[in-house]
Image (cartoon, grey):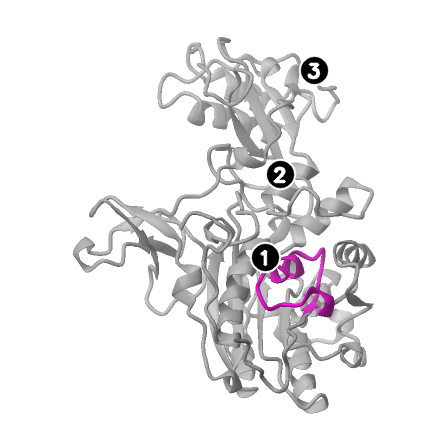
């Protein structure tokens, strides 16, 4: 039985900073949410067009959400999802960012003294305040609170100087707050696709105290994992390595939290939840073209940036030899001294055997085209999808001594990245350019993460159980 709150029996969603609609799509897979009551707002016209293409019966608003009178254009909705712009919180493009200081610059530095980058970051971070503004607007103007919602951002948002104050503002408005660190690859949805992508994000879930119930978070956020100590499957427990830390990234070696077996007899045994590999989103019929066939230029004498080639060499050496003698990478014509030296140091030839990828190809590598990341195999989840082309696929035919000219290379395609973000193949991206589509995907919320959080909130909101695997997925 659906329990009415504040006279509401139709649960529509306001998707603030709606982007390409990943959160809206996820919400509409959750029981008791009405797709016809969706309302989206964004400053980006391509984002709004994509959102409308996938929600043709919904209402929308296009404009600057930070404008003083913008909030008056937003109707009341009992559920809110908000994804304020996240690039300003990260060390994007290798530029160091002072999370705790730059918003405070606005208090004592004249606007004309700020660099353009500082001004843009200050404005971007101020978007978090728009969440509070809409929640307060609903109470003061519509006379009723938003009942439940979630704010999504990169995990570094917790470094903000006003982070604690911002959380307290939510509580002052009557909300019970749950801060969630979740990697998309660990989200186990009931209706959307799982994510073959390692994407660490912060989620701040809220439910109004007038609801009288709080979500059963363990049911929706604890992933399945196998514990070797007692030889059984369990619901893994998220444990941060340092007491008092509530936000960070997943990682046994370098992350802030891990998953452990909850059984007392296992004494906190670390477990690793199974995840989807990147190979599930890669087109096996397009292995790429030989690097040796790529056009040469003065600044790219090998056809690719030297840093990219160096990562390819390192990836082949580490990932395709199983610790045996590294393959011989023969230098191509032309090139710089740095790469030549790197190639000359590789040991005698080793023949690489097939790894079962497709058409006899060795299992591929995913290599970052820019940045500081390392190559990974397609048996692992892909790294975070950014807003521009970053991930390339590297393959090798079996039975050959490794020669850099013969290594197959290509950038990942939009449909592959769309699947890596867990959007279905029929999800519409309206920009005609690849750059425009990549920008939407890189800024999007992965649907499975949004779905499990919203299922937990909705279950508490309506007061009835939502089956964890109602659509026949393995329990």
Mark 2 highlights which residue? 370
Residue 139 counted in the magenta span: no
Image point (33%, 63%), residue name = 242
Viewer can see residue 108? no
Residue 284 located left or right of residue 111: left
Residue 20 counted in the magenta span: yes
Mark 1 highlights which residue? 90
In the image, residue 365 above or below residue 402: below
Mark 1: give few (<14), some (14-19) or many (20+) Cα within 10 Å: some
Image point (45%, 68%), residue name = 465
Are the residues tagged 1 and 2 within 8 Å (C-beta)?
no
Secondary structure of residue under mark 1: loop
**Gap in angstroms between the C-alphas marked 1 and 2:** 16 Å
Secondary structure of residue under mark 2: loop
**Gap in angstroms between the C-alphas marked 3 and 2:** 21 Å
Q: Position of residue 106 (x, y in %)?
A: 68, 75
Image point (81%, 56%), residue name = 49
**Gap in angstroms between the C-alphas marked 3 and 1:** 36 Å
Between residue 309 and residue 426, name the one nearer to us. 426
Label whose residue precedes the other's in the sequence (3 or 1): 1
Residue 449 located left or right of residue 390: left
Mark 3 highlights which residue? 293
Q: Which residues are magenta?
A: 14-37
Mark 2: give few (<14), some (14-19) or many (20+) Cα within 10 Å: some
Between residue 227 and residue 86, name the one nearer to us. 227
Are the residues tagged 3 and 2 within 8 Å (C-beta)?
no
Mark 3: give few (<14), some (14-19) or many (20+) Cα within 10 Å: few
Are the residues tagged 3 and 1 within 8 Å (C-beta)?
no
């Amino acid at each position: 039985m659906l329990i009415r709150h504040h006279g509401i029996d139709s649960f529509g969603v306001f998707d603030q900073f709606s982007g390409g609609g990943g959160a809206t799509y996820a919400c509409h897979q959750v029981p008791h949410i009405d797709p016809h009551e969706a309302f989206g707002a964004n400053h980006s016209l391509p984002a709004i067009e994509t959102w409308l293409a996938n929600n043709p019966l919904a209402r929308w608003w296009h404009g600057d959400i930070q404008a003083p009178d913008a909030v008056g254009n937003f109707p009341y909705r009992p559920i809110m999802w908000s994804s304020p712009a996240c690039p300003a919180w990260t060390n994007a493009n290798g530029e160091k960012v002072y999370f705790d200081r730059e918003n405070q610059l606005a208090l004592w530095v004249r606007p004309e003294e700020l660099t353009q980058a500082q001004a843009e970051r200050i404005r971007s971070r101020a978007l978090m305040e728009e969440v509070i503004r809409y929640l307060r607007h609903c109470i003061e103007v519509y006379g009723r609170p938003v009942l439940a919602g979630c704010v999504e951002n990169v995990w570094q948002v917790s470094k903000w100087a006003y982070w604690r104050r911002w959380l307290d503002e939510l509580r002052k408005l009557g909300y019970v707050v749950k801060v969630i660190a979740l990697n998309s690859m660990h989200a186990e949805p009931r209706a959307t696709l799982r994510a073959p992508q390692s994407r660490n994000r912060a989620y701040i879930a809220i439910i109004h105290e007038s609801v009288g119930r709080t979500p059963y978070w363990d049911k929706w956020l604890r992933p399945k994992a196998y514990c070797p100590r007692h030889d059984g499957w369990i619901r893994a427990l998220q444990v941060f390595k340092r007491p008092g830390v509530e936000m960070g990234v997943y990682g046994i070696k370098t992350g802030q939290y891990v998953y452990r077996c909850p059984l007392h007899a296992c004494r906190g045994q670390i477990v690793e939840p199974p995840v989807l590999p990147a190979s599930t989103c890669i087109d096996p019929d397009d292995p790429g073209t030989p690097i040796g066939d790529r056009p040469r230029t003065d600044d790219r004498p090998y056809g690719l940036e030297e840093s990219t080639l160096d990562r390819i060499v390192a990836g082949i050496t580490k990932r395709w030899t199983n610790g045996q003698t590294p393959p011989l990478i023969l230098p191509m014509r032309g090139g710089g001294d740095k790469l030549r030296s790197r190639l000359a140091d590789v040991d005698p030839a080793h023949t690489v055997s097939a790894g079962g990828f497709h058409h006899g190809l060795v299992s591929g590598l995913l290599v970052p085209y820019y940045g500081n990341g390392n190559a990974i195999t397609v048996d692992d989840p892909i790294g975070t999808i950014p807003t521009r082309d970053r991930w390339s696929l590297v393959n090798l035919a079996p039975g050959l001594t490794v020669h850099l000219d013969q290594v197959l290379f290509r950038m990942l395609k939009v449909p592959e990245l769309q699947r890596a973000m867990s959007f279905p193949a029929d999800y519409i991206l309206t920009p005609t350019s690849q750059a425009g589509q990549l920008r939407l995907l890189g800024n999007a919320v992965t649907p499975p993460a949004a779905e499990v959080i919203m299922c937990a909130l909705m279950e508490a909101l309506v007061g009835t159980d939502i089956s964890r695997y109602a659509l026949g997925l393995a329990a």
